Image: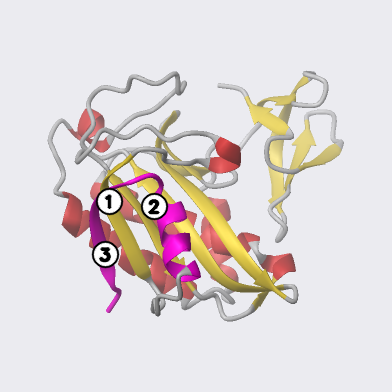
Amino acid sequence: MSKIIFLEETDSTNTCLQKMIAAGDDLPNATTLWVRSQSAGRGQRGNSWESSPGKNLTFSMLMYPGQMDVSRQFVVSEAVAVAIAEVLRDSMPGHDITVKWPNDIYAGNKKIAGILIENSLSDRRIARTVAGIGVNVNQQLFLSDAPNPVSMRQLLGSDTPLEPLLQRFVEAVEENFRNLDSPRLHERYMAMLWRGNGFHPYADAADGSCFNARIAAVEPSGHIVLEKDNGTECRFAFKEVVALL
């Protein structure tokens, strides 16, 4: 059974959980820190995360991926993203829930959840993972300049109880971490990709050039391989390419 720690407020659940680890707290696998409000929620590459206090789920999970080689670290991100997306699919029948590479969760063309993975390495092995997860649940108004947020409340028309939903997310992440070596995990990730089929517009972040491409592969390193409509393939790391809405 996972250990869930609840706090009224902290700066960032990932930062707070990392401080607990650094202080020598004996935290078992799947320890989950859930807060009602975070004052400095973090997203990928320093982006902020907006969440009205008590309306959404903001939590971090401590996981031990079994000394996985660092060359396979993206499977950790896949495990968390697939877990969150599959629970949302089950909770929101009829809504198009997908994973936008690398690990944003979309409902249609809008972002409903975000994930921040922080791995601690030891001799090219992943000693532990702290996965920060934010899910827009019952928030009805977004005030930040985030381009396309959406919540379950906006789509379903009614509130969703937070604690039972949190428990489902935690159980789904735990289950995927028990199966990190299964090829089915990557297959499930690829099957859930936003714009996973057909050609769509992208922009190269280096020079701003625009092109149409389809997703050819996502590598174990996390790089995405895009096949342009002229048949050439390009390989990108996160934030080296932008999917145009």
Relative to 99, residue 62 above or below: below
Work out how far the residue at label 3 is from the one at label 1, CA to CA, in angstroms: 8 Å
* Residue at mark 3: 5
Residue at x 59%, y 63% (from the top left corner): 119
Residue at x 60%, y 71% (from the top left corner): 183
Mark 2–mark 1 CB contact (< 8 Å): yes
| Amino acid beneath label 1 | Val
The location of residue 76, given as percent across then percent down, is 56, 64
Work out how far the residue at label 2 is from the one at label 3, CA to CA, in angstroms: 11 Å
Relative to 81, residue 49 above or below: above
Mark 3–mark 1 CB contact (< 8 Å): no
* Residue at mark 2: 13
The location of residue 229, given as percent across then percent down, is 78, 29
The location of residue 54, given as percent across then percent down, is 19, 41
Q: Secondary structure at mark 2?
A: helix
First in sequence: mark 2 or mark 3? Answer: 3
Q: Residues within 10 Å of mark 1 (few under 14, many from 20)?
A: many
Residue at x 21%, y 38% (from the top left corner): 55
First in sequence: mark 3 or mark 1? Answer: 3
| Amino acid beneath label 2 | Thr
Compare residues 222 and 91 and report the one nearer the observer: 222
Note whether residue 56 is visible. yes
Relative to 65, residue 33 above or below: above
* Quadrant assignment for the C terminus: top right
* Quadrant assignment for the N terminus: bottom left
* Residue at mark 1: 35
Note whether residue 196 is visible. no
The boundaries of the magenta stretch are: 1-22
Q: Secondary structure at mark 3?
A: strand
Relative to 127, residue 167 above or below: above
Residue at x 56%, y 42% (from the top left corner): 44
